[in-house]
Amino acid sequence: MYPIVRTTRFGAALFSVALLAACGDDQTAADHGDFCDAMEQASSLLEPNTGSPTPVGTRARYEELSSVLDVAEREAPTTIAGDVATFATAIDNYVTALASVDYDLDVLYSTPEGVQLADDTSHAITPAMVEHLTGPCDISLG
């Protein structure tokens, strides 16, 4: 499988979760500014076909994503803080696996364990997070 296809599958999984979530409450992005900004950046970094699929590009993208998620964890609303921490940990585990294969997506996806890790990571975002992202943060996922 090609790296772009895998990235697309990861983005598609996030989009599928978004479709399952109900949108909105009465809060706005301004109520959670830094969190929403960080998650908007994270969403962009997880979009299909974002950046170079080369190991150098993959490394840069996921290092940036890890930094952005550090901010999101610090700024997360208490109602979803645990979910955000779980998602960030899943991404960190994925990045650790990528680092172990020098950020070569083909190598990572050449094993059933690598494929399973990617699937598990893409399902780590919870419906409560998606509801908050698409509601108060007004982020379009997908």
Image (spheres, helix red, strand yellow):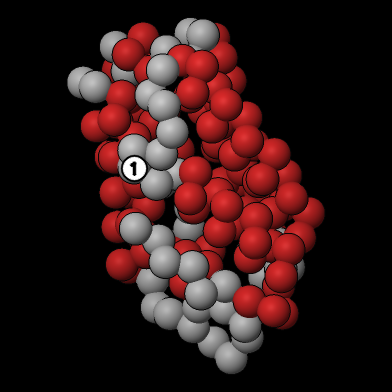
The picture places residue 114, in percent across and down from the top left corner, at 38, 20
List x then y, in percent, for residue 40: 56, 58
The C terminus: image quadrant: bottom left
As shown in the figure, which amino acid type bears the numbered disc 1? Pro
Q: Is residue 126 shown left or right of residue 108?
A: right
Residue 70 pos. (x, y %): 72, 44
Q: Residue at x 49, y 43 (%)?
A: 45
Q: Position of residue 23 (x, y in %)?
A: 43, 80
Residue at x 51% of width, y 16% of height: 56
Q: Residue furthest bottom?
A: 26
- Near-viewer residue (32 or 64): 64
Tag 1: Cα neighbours inside 10 Å, few (<14), some, or many (≥20)? Answer: some
Q: How many numbered tags mark residues here?
A: 1
* Position of residue 24 in the picture relative to residue 111 (left or right): right
Element marked by disc 1 = loop
The residue that appears at 24% across and 32% down in the rendered structure is 5
Question: Can residue 94 be spotted in the picture?
Answer: yes
Residue 80, relative to residue 124: is it above or below? Answer: below
Residue that badge 1 annotates: 48
Which residue extends farthest left? 1
Q: Residue at x 51, y 27 (%)?
A: 94
Camera-side residue: 128 or 141? Answer: 141
